Image (spheres, rainbow, N blue to C red):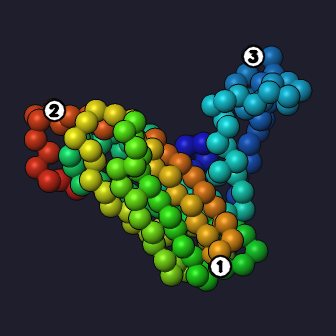
Amino acid sequence: KIAVEEARRLPRVSGYHILSAFRLHGNRGMADDLARHVDPEFADYAEVNGATALVLDRGYQGRTLSAGQNACVTLHLSHFGPVPLEDGRLRWSVAGPEGVVAEGTVEGLTFDRGRNGPLTELRFRVPEATDKLTLVAELHDGGKPVAANRWDFWAFEAPDGNVGGSVLC
């Protein structure tokens, strides 16, 4: 999923091809030889494999955050759906084991079809705990769902114990 998101985030990429989605003769794939069992690791693949997808501004790097820091994440849109986004509404939340730690709504989003690029920036304060956090985002246009996705982050105490109010974008 991360590799597909990385490709879809590039402004000049308008498509991609997956050589094989099946596990054949010991090769790694998303489904067994008869496509009857989808590997759980690929269960969220559908979130990035439609005509329109929300993608994160980072791949594997940048997923580790310091507890207490102010975090900044840019969501990109890879939009090859039938119509432009004219009145987009993005609902997002960041949750950890104790529940939702940040949430918000961004309204009035517009985006032309047939391109990839930044959609909006989200900011939140990372909790003062060592935990897994999950960012969930859902994009609607005119009340209709357009795209949804989720990403995991990991929060750890800063090495020196002091994050100094830094912002990681």
Residue at image mark 3: 26
Q: Residues within 10 Å of mark 2 (few under 14, many from 20)?
A: few
Residue at image mark 2: 159
- What amino acid type is highlighted by mark number 3? Gly
Quadrant of the rendering where the C terminus is positioned: bottom left
Mark before the other along the chain sequence, 1 or 2: 1
Would residue 3 be found to the left or right of residue 59 on screen? right
Picture layout, residue 70 above or below residue 30: below
- What amino acid type is highlighted by mark number 2? Pro
Residue at image coords 57%, 52%: 149
Would residue 161 be found to the left or right of residue 61 on screen? left
Nearer to us in this view, 101 or 162 = 101
Mark 1 or 3: in front is 1
Mark before the other along the chain sequence, 2 or 3: 3
Q: Are marks 1 and 2 in contact (CB under 8 Å)?
A: no
Would residue 98 be found to the left or right of residue 140 on screen? left
The label number, if any, that marks residue 142 in the structure image: 1
Nearer to us in this view, 87 or 7 = 87
Number of marks in the rendered image: 3
Picture layout, residue 116 above or below residue 69: below
Kindly state the secondary structure of the residue where label 1 is placed.
loop
**CA gap, disc 2 to disc 3?**
41 Å
- What amino acid type is highlighted by mark number 1? Gly
Quadrant of the rendering where the N terminus is positioned: top right
Percent across and percent down for residue 63 are 38, 42
